[in-house]
Image: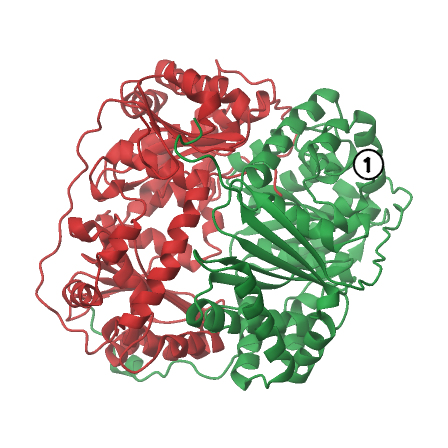
Amino acid sequence: MKRLCAAALIVVLGLAAAPIRKIQFTDTKLKNGLRVIVSEDHAAPVFSIVVNYNVGSRDERKGRTGFAHLFEHMMFKGSENVGQNEQPYLIFMNGGTMNGMTSKDRTVYYETLPANQLDMALFLESDRMRALAITKDNLDNQRNAVQEERRLAVDNQPYGKTFEAIDELAYENFAYEHSVIGSMADLNAASVEDVTAFFKTYYAPNNAIIAIVGDVDTKTTLGKLDKYFGSIPAQPAPPQVDMTEAPQKEERRLTLEDQLARLPRIDMAYKVPPSSSPDMDPLSVLGTILSGGRSSRFYEAIVRQKQLSNGIGAGTNDSRGPGLFQITGTALPGKTLKDLEEAIDQELERIKTAPIADWEMEKARTGARRSLVAGLGSSLNRAVQISEEALFFNDPDRINTRADRIARVTAADVQRVANQYLVKTNRNVVLTLPKATAPGRGGQ
Amino acid sequence: MPPFVFIAAVLGVLAAALPQAPAAPAQPSTTQMVLKKKAPVSNDVLKVKLPRPQEADLPNGLHLMVLEDHRLPQVTFTLIIPGAGGYFDPADKIGLASYTASLMREGTKTRTSPQISEALETMAASLAVTSSLSGPTASVSGSALTESFDKLMDLTADVLLNPLFDPAEWDRFKTRTKAGLIQQRTNPGFLATEMFNRAVFGSHPAGRVSPTAANLDAISPEALVEFHRTHYAPDHAALAFAGDISLADARRLVDAKLGAWKKTGTPQTAVADPPPMSTPKVYLVARPGSVQTTLYVGAQSMTRTDPDYAALTVVNRVLGGTMGRLFRHLREEKGYTYGIGSGFSATLYRGSWNSSTSVRTEVTEPALTDLLAELAELRDTPVPENELADAKRAIVGSFARDLESPQQVLGYYIDNWLYGLSSDYWDTYPARIMGVTAAQAQAAAQKYWGPGRLQIVAVGDATKITDLLRKKGTLELYDADGNPVK
């Protein structure tokens, strides 16, 4: 056993909340309009690069749902100087990781790599932004993969169709009403011409933001960014997305049957403003108080005491357009959705009228601070977040201010937004009921 | 929704920790992979030396490990207790270890379950006690900001040493858990894993995936108390910290908070390998309404210290790593699936290897045929040198990314302790991977993926796939509750 020195034993651990290091970055634009953000951090010999394109399923037109995501798959099928699948192959072969993600609001591509592979990453990202290889073979091939993805994530999952039903019920605005994965029929209708036009319009340097975080030298990196991306021509700005959503006047309800589910489930979606609204911070705290962890009100009252459900989630997601505050819970065997809904409504009523405890507010504050610290541990997390703050809010420094913003939210703010948004005329309810299958033969 | 899905097929300690790699096959060529070789790739593999934790042995038997890293104001810890895992469950009380662990967090002699939740979440800290149904250890793990870590250790000590096992909390827990037992049967991946482990491990504890409602009802609060009293001993346990803490601080904390945790004199527990597998069969789990077939193909693997470990790691990466042969062939060339991969577990007893995927019902037969053909290809033909070199480079190159996370690095050294690996194991690991030859990789494929040992599990619409699966071997049919269908 190692003998420890006496001096070390009397060191007192920690105590006061240390200030959290601010994330430093440069934020500039190349001549072609490409916004580049570089945040140097030598904590580990790696860097992450994120290319965030200002296009998502909200930019799709009717009859082409699922197209933004299908297009994302095409970005791995080669470009002028990069072969089919060579991009992912090179990234993984050299110890990196990469992927792409499409949401309603944006399409993001990322790589995390050892520090000596910066040129490779920039070459690969710039080649596909400049000259994507668009062929019918590639399109047909990825159409298959995406349709399989739809089966895996939606059609073969219990409650898979519920996710689509909520947005379809809640929104009237087409951009936000339809799912990112899209319909099988629309995926089949996508043509090579669609791909070509989409690429030219949306994958232009002036419609993208690059964030690089990690073990790089800022000045050298900015020079390389100009070298690889600077000569890609800008394009006319894409059309603006219609984000208007008519105010909802009465509650909407829908009941679904699901052959793959075994327990009934309730989903509620209340209309809330876009994420740029100052009300989003109080709504975030509201979500934490209602459903954050086992000290939350939903857990304690409905899961633990009343034993109506084994878990209820509540909260908002980032949305550049009209948003939703969603509540989801599954009823335990022998319990009804009616009882579960009443119990949820009771808790919503309580938070609107009865006092919120100090510790509940403190929990939200500390949680935001902890997320900030945890995010600092990953170059990829920072690169994604900083690019989204820039794309959604034109303010990459929001990455540094979120914890402070949450800390400024008061209990009165939380009650105000609960009273304003969580009202029945503003909500959409989807009930999913298990559909009984023929007994006995196990599908035979 | 990302286009590349990474399948962490099994619970492999290392297989899961390292991202899987690419390849370029000779025979089962794919039309969907072209290397133009114009990108400026640095040919150096970044030499990474993992920082080592400081270690100490305490008088109560506890082994202390600290990976000091002050980059961020947070600390994580893991306490591993051999002998407290589900491996040691009595046959009539399957789940006892797992539920003992879960209930420890549901109240102590001085704190109720809600009080524990409130205290933890107000400081944004986490604390979990877990034990699997099959493994030999239980673990207590948590994390907090530095400023709250002292308080977290107070709670941890209370949960570890003074759990109440209140009958009312046990009843609540049973109700919630029974709902989970029903819900998991809707998940095709769960059904496949359950059947696969049964096929590969038989009645060995490793074959257990989930308890039954009857198991739950057979366990009393007194049994939980007794299991905790007799199995939560420090004698052979390890406590590992990573982050904003020094060895001296950790030592002081353990002395102050866990001083009451005394040595019991219980001997080190031993585990046995699972019995040899039964004759390979095809197991079909009928899932009415399924639009996909979920396929698992696999067999028993090895223990963590097996000399074949590096060779199987490399050849598995060629086959089922990201951008590996299975991905390029079955997804990119044939379009059968969104994701496919393979992986293996290797622990104190023999683990398992498998390849898994979900394919649309209509292509079940060609997908399974192609999957089996890829295994045959690796048994019959040496991996071409370039492809082998790429796979090895991918494994070794990924260590640089681990340096972002002290917990990740500490995890490697916890494996050293758990499996008795040499102290320089990770310093020499890259050389061992790089040293795997094409002949060794082929020998591993022949040994572990031999046609006489591969079990096949399919979960899907039995009305459409029963006949074609019969072509692949003797078929047994089950319903979604796991019962045989005559």
The chain under label 1 reads A
Outermost front residue? A439
Label 1's element? helix
Left or right: B368 in relation to A39: left
Q: Tell me: A293 left or right of A223.
A: left
**Residue corresponding to mark 1:** A198
Q: Nearer the viewer, residue B373 or B306?
A: B373
Chain letter, colour red in render: B
Tell me where residue B90 appears, x and y as whole percent: 15, 52
Crowding around mark 1 (Cα neighbors within 10 Å: few <14, some 14 to 19, many 20+) is some
Which image quadrant is residue B222 in?
Answer: bottom left
Image quarter of residue A99? top right
Q: Position of residue A411 (x, y in %)?
A: 63, 83
Is residue A3 depicted above or below A262 in this figure? below
The residue drawn where x is 74% and y is 21% is A136
Q: Is residue A220 visible?
A: no
Q: Residue A405's spot in the image, x, y percent?
A: 67, 76
Most foreground residue, B449 or B42: B449
The colour of chain A is: green
* Along the viewing direction, whichever of B348 and A142 lies nearer the viewer: A142
- Which kind of residue does numbered mark 1 sit on? Phe
Q: Residue at x 51, y 72 (%)?
A: A296
State whether residue B396 appears in this view: yes
Looking at the image, which is closer to me, B431 or B263?
B263
* Up/down of A299 relative to B462, above or below: below
